[in-house]
Image (spheres, rainbow, N blue to C red):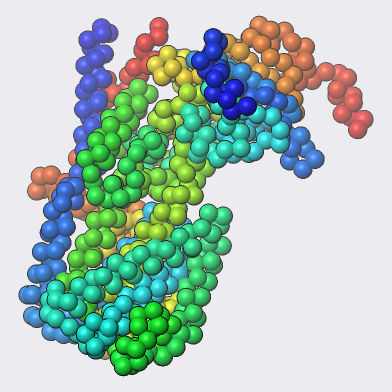
Amino acid sequence: MTEGDRDRDRRSMKRVAERIAQQQIGAGPAALGSLWPLVLGVAFAWFLQQWIAPAIGPFYAKVVLDIGIAIVAASSLNIVNGFGGQFSIGHAGFMMVGGYAAAWLTYYGSIQLWGSPALHGGFLGGGDLLFLCGCVLAGIVAAATGVLVGLPSLRLRGDYLAIVTLGFGEIIRVLIQRTGDVMSPHDAEAAGMLGTVGHLGGSLGFGGVPTYTRIFYVYVFVTIVVVCAYRLKISSRGRALLAVRENEVAAEAVGINTARVKVQAFVMSAFFAGIGGTLFAHELGTTLNPQELGFQKSIDIVIMVVLGGMGSISGVVLSATILTIMPELFREFSSYRMPIYALALIIVMIVRPQGLLGIKELWDTALWRRFAGKHGNGGTPRAIVNPPSTGADKRPIAKDKP
Amino acid sequence: MSAATRAAPSEAPRAPALEARGLSLSFGGLKAVDQFSLTLAEKGLSGLIGPNGAGKTTVFNLLTGVYRPDGGEILLGGQRVDGMKPSAIASAGLSRTFQNIRLFGSLSVLDNVRTAAGVRARSGLIRSLLRTPLYLAEEQAILERSLELLDMLGIAHRAGEQANSLPYGEQRKLEIARALATEPKVVLLDEPVAGMNAIEKQEMRTLIQGLRDQFEVAILLIEHDMGLVMDICEHITVLDHGVTIATGNAAAIQGDPKVIEAYLGTTESVAVEGAS
């Protein structure tokens, strides 16, 4: 074989490989590569709020809203449990930290600014801005607690880490139960912001939190969380996290600082959980109290992640949606609701122990490919995955030696 | 001390790629490795052999920071690395493969290499999420480099497949590709041809020899296949029960009575073991 032949072989092989790489990056959600997934998400959120919500009535509007919050919670847990393989079962604890931090800001902040904790201003008015500040505060406070929980995860794994995270959730719950009653507007105004820190309602719950959560905001955050999770997954940082899940020893051996990667994952996960908690705290028709965001809530979120497929963003979004709708569907048979729910879970776990989508994304599945294949792009054609072995078996290094 | 080490590379003879001085490690009362020393020249190719349980992999684990030595020092290009974390040592330029293959099993072949190639990327979490130009340029470079590595090792056509679905021989190649992706100065190969047939062995032999020319790395390998070791290694160290019993080139090792004794035993040693 001449030098030219060899070069051509290598070039053709490289093209094949590059096409695979392109497929991997660009398959399905190629759009997520630029700014406009966010624009699209905002538009979708607006559409849901302006047209869908009025059409389906308040009951189903609340279900739509709950789905959004569930997606935020489950997608953020997926970063630690799914990508990082660190089994955390105290996720509601982060939501609680964030939710209370934001509720404190909006309730007492409203009193300081406008003299009453009632809703203030319309869409994107003063109250809404305060609420968005609350979201950021919640994210930051929850992320800080994420560091605290992430640190023990450096020495613990598996069941032991699960116990630590469970303990964390319970500690947060008990601490909040021990806070004082919610202060009246009059007292709060006199006490100032810092004077109200310890007054979060205790075990009775934080009543009177202004209900700023709208479908629009919820789905804007859903978009942000999903896009961030996706971008993390396909980046070098994300692959480092996946590597920790796959094989920690090998991850260290290629130079990944596993300790740092794990703490980063906990921080990012907690940040978004905090925002999820804020959305929950300001939702109409729910009372922010420690029981609501207790152990049961953590388990619900874990189930969403496990059922959807640990590490699959689309799978988790799908299962969060299904698992939020399902209890509502069975509401009429409320006495059989939990057994049916449990049975459904057991069946899914027997049939698909890796979760609905395993570690794949929706656009990696055979079903999607068959559908997308008819419409041109998307999916990876068979021929590329297993190219005809034209020169692909040649080993350049080996060939340089006689 | 540190001033002296820093000055070393500029002095006439450049520091060896990897140097171990008097490494020791005990597990409880058992001396797994005793006073192990080794010098690996730049672009050198050395072998580490010994009977089962001689402590070869333990030496690798010491060099790569998995175990912390009880005594002795490790210098990578003249810089002390003992006591550092495995990830820090890997970043300093020491890369390895594993005896029992440790791939990122459920990731794709390409992603296995990209993970390793991405370790040196400068863009952090925020840049990755915002997709800044720096991040995109880095990812593109990582992708190209990874494909090139897969291409060089002849497994580019497998890029999209799941790593643990590869046949055994290709998994070994992928491990080597991943090790090279970290841009190492020294590569440690732990039994690269274990479980391979004659043809695969021949391939691997040419591949290993090609590595140091193409990537300018020094290679230290553990291998039980004596033919391979004697053929390609310029320098061989023989371990038995954690003690270095012989060093030298292939001819010297083959004639060394201690080596023969370690592998085949003697009538006296059988008698002694029988008595105790």
B162 displayed left or right of A374: right
Tell me which residue sits at (40%, 48%) in the image. Answer: A242
Can residue B148 be seen by looking at this rendering? yes
Tell me which residue sits at (39%, 67%) in the image. Answer: A142
Q: Is residue A208 above or below residue B259?
A: below
A341 displayed left or right of A17: right
Q: Is residue B206 above or below residue B89?
A: above
Task: State the image quarter where residue B151 is shown.
Answer: top left
Considering the image in quadrants, where does the C terminus of chain A appear? top left
Task: State the image quarter where residue A271 is shown.
Answer: bottom left
Query: Which one is nearer the viewer's eye here, A361 or B215?
Result: B215
Question: Where residue A154 sits: x, y (%)?
Answer: 53, 54
Tell me which residue sits at (68%, 14%) in the image. Answer: B247
Task: State the image quarter where residue A5 is shown.
Answer: top left
Question: Where residue B270 sits: x, y (%)?
Answer: 85, 24
Query: Which one is nearer the viewer's eye here, A269 or B169?
Result: A269
How many marks can you see? 0
Question: Where residue B39 sits: x, y (%)?
Answer: 61, 18
